[in-house]
Image (cartoon, coloured by chain):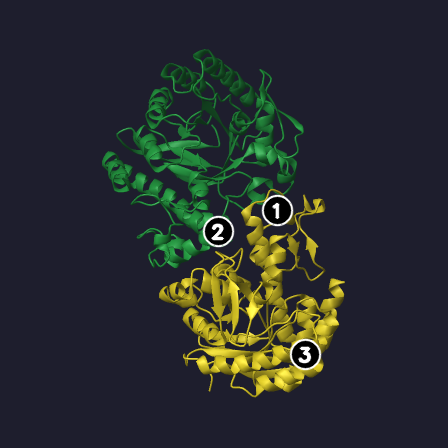
Chain colours: A yellow, B green
Amino acid sequence: MSVVTWSAERTSGSARTGTLQTPHGDIPTPAFMPVGTRATVKGVDRNDLIACGADIILANTYHLMLRPGEGVVKGLGGLHGFAAWERPILTDSGGFQIFSLSSKVTEEGVAFRSTYDGSPVMLTPERAIQVQEDLGADIAMVLDVLVGLPAERSVLDSAVERTLRWTERALGAKRRDDRAVFGIVQGGVDPVLRRKSARGTASLDVAGFGIGGLSVGETGHECNAAIEATVPELPDDKVRYVMGLGDTEGMLDAIERGVDLFDCVLPTRLARHGKVLSRSGDYSIKKAEWVSSADPLMPGCTCYTCATYSRGYVRHLFNTKELLALRLATIHNLTYTLTLMADARQAILDDRYASFSAEVKDRRL
Amino acid sequence: MSVVTWSAERTSGSARTGTLQTPHGDIPTPAFMPVGTRATVKGVDRNDLIACGADIILANTYHLMLRPGEGVVKGLGGLHGFAAWERPILTDSGGFQIFSLSSKVTEEGVAFRSTYDGSPVMLTPERAIQVQEDLGADIAMVLDVLVGLPAERSVLDSAVERTLRWTERALGAKRRDDRAVFGIVQGGVDPVLRRKSARGTASLDVAGFGIGGLSVGETGHECNAAIEATVPELPDDKVRYVMGLGDTEGMLDAIERGVDLFDCVLPTRLARHGKVLSRSGDYSIKKAEWVSSADPLMPGCTCYTCATYSRGYVRHLFNTKELLALRLATIHNLTYTLTLMADARQAILDDRYASFSAEVKDRRL
């Protein structure tokens, strides 16, 4: 029995609520994980995250193994102690970052150069697990082979096969019984390959399933189709996590198809550019029309920013490039996203998910 | 009777404690005002400031009249409503910023170009008061004539004379009975001119006294001498505020000479550069020696940063240029500075100020 389990609660169509249990606490799903690449979610701190309603955050193996190094993090209490975050943490394997860099992938692993100092680094499936166990995250992701789209079917197929072999090696390298490992389904937007990857991954002893290689430029329709091909091949009693997805419509569609977990830099990155997520449609707070507005960023929002400050003040902070602008917008966008997940959970409990999803999308048009 | 008054409590030598009463609350003195140039103290928010122990903040007339404009701020509830800061606020007059720009000073006022869009702006003593009354700060400062040092005595003398005439005009332009105006003593580092300026300002109906033109490159000895020449000419029952001073040793020396109030960007600016203020001497948190340190920034400090995070984590945040670095260091440096003021007050109450000041300086060597 893994230390990380998922138990179902209620369904509404294919959408489902449940509880992800981890060594650092339970997470009601569907859930969104704010991204703390370097053991900090940009713009906010732990208290902000808790006030926003975050139950779990994601940190980045690639960046942390290079700076400050997993040994330093381990010595300072692992990620939980290092970042003073007592709730659950998931670490990605570094596969996505390495995919974005010029790297050389062989059967052994991935060779690349550090983005910090150019030094050569080798990441293997075994080392990815060792690093993540040193970082101490509740959930580690296997190192996977990510292929840019569009790609030849043979290339995608090889990536699927290699990812399955790497997953076996990762599970063999697992040492800590108090931590869990998730597999990652690949296969691009090819339903046949997605099914093959999902079946293969499901046959292995993983505690949950990442669905990777999405949100990399494909259409919403292609993304939905890939999820539809994947989910039926996965067991009902384990969690399903679409990696890198975090826009409102995309998450609503994925939940409708039985997905439980998300992460994305979008809410925090958009915030730092002055883009406000809102139930009535996203907008830029930098526009001159808000200069004298006494309204909150989003009427009805209960976040600290909306409860305390006006659009006029937040616009002023962006307009004068003040640091507080970034934090206030980030708090709002994270609260918006986490509230969307809470609302989705309630809609599933009430067995009205499809109409809820349609209403949310409609209000945002 | 002014709405802003200062009442003495205890003395220790020339050092004194007291209470500055304002429309938005009382401030125990000696006190330090964090600088919120554009209606935000860089790196922190209102809750941070309250947790750090800030009783009053300073905002900048020059910057706010240009962006977003005093009319916008007035419409959004004045500075208190705009920045959601319910405690006292002091606004400087803009004299210092204009001194730093290429501006043309005549008897009428100061003509300059906006740092934002280059548009021509005219600031007069009357307009400086009107802008500050619209901003709604508890305490407005008169527009003064600041002279760069070293300067000819005749130039300094003219600045003193003109500042006195401008102070009379400022007081004549005052409209709000629920707000107060402080005069500003000038005179460079010339004791004769300082005495003249202090006597002239003390003869006018101001609610308190800024001591300006210091912390602009003079030595500590010159600064102390200028304060020593000024203070005896000021009435005992009004507050004395050295503008722009905020380093530990400088404030300790000024308090010893009867000064009650300070403001400075130093604690917050140093924080953003990774310089940590500490009882055992200031240091850079960016140094490699802290990479694995589990110690807080300053042992014994009760601030949120020191209570929550290690030097190793804060160094990592600076080393990877993460936003949270700036906030955590700012919280610590402000807490350090505000705690220094609280400790000074206690030492005066205990009539041991001279030994307290010597001990603090000694520990920091």
**Which chain does the numbered disc 2 sit on?**
B
Return the x and y of residue A201 as percentages of the image width and height. Answer: 58, 84
Q: In the depicted view, which residue is nearer to us: B319 or B7?
A: B319
Gap in angstroms between the C-alphas marked 3 and 1: 48 Å
Q: Secondary structure at mark 3?
A: helix
Q: Is residue B309 left or right of residue A36?
A: left
Horizontal and vertical percent position of residue B162 = 51, 16
Indicate the position of residue B49 as horizontal and vertical percent values.
Answer: 46, 47
Indicate which label's residue lies in the foreground, 3 or 1.
3
- Chain ID of residue with mark 3: A
Q: Is residue B347 above or below residue B196?
A: below
- Of labels 3 and 1, earlier in sequence is 3
Pick out the residue farthest to the top: B154
**Gap in Å between the C-alphas at discs 2 and 3?**
57 Å
Badge 1 density bin: few <14, some 14–19, many ≥20, Cα 10 Å: many
Residue situated in front as seen by the camera: B341 or B290: B290
Eyeballing the image, is A21 above or below B233? below
Q: Which residue is mark 2?
A: B47
Numbered disc 1: what chain? Answer: A
Which residue position is annotated with label 1?
A318
Identified by mark 3, the residue type is Ser
- State whether discs 2 and 3 lie on one chain: no
Which mark identifies residue A154? 3
Q: Secondary structure at mark 1?
A: helix
Q: Check if mark 3 and mark 1 are on a common chain.
A: yes
- Report the residue at 43% width, 49% height from top: B329
Asked whether the residues under the numbered discs 3 and 1 touch, taking CB atoms below 8 Å apart as contact, a structural biologist would say no
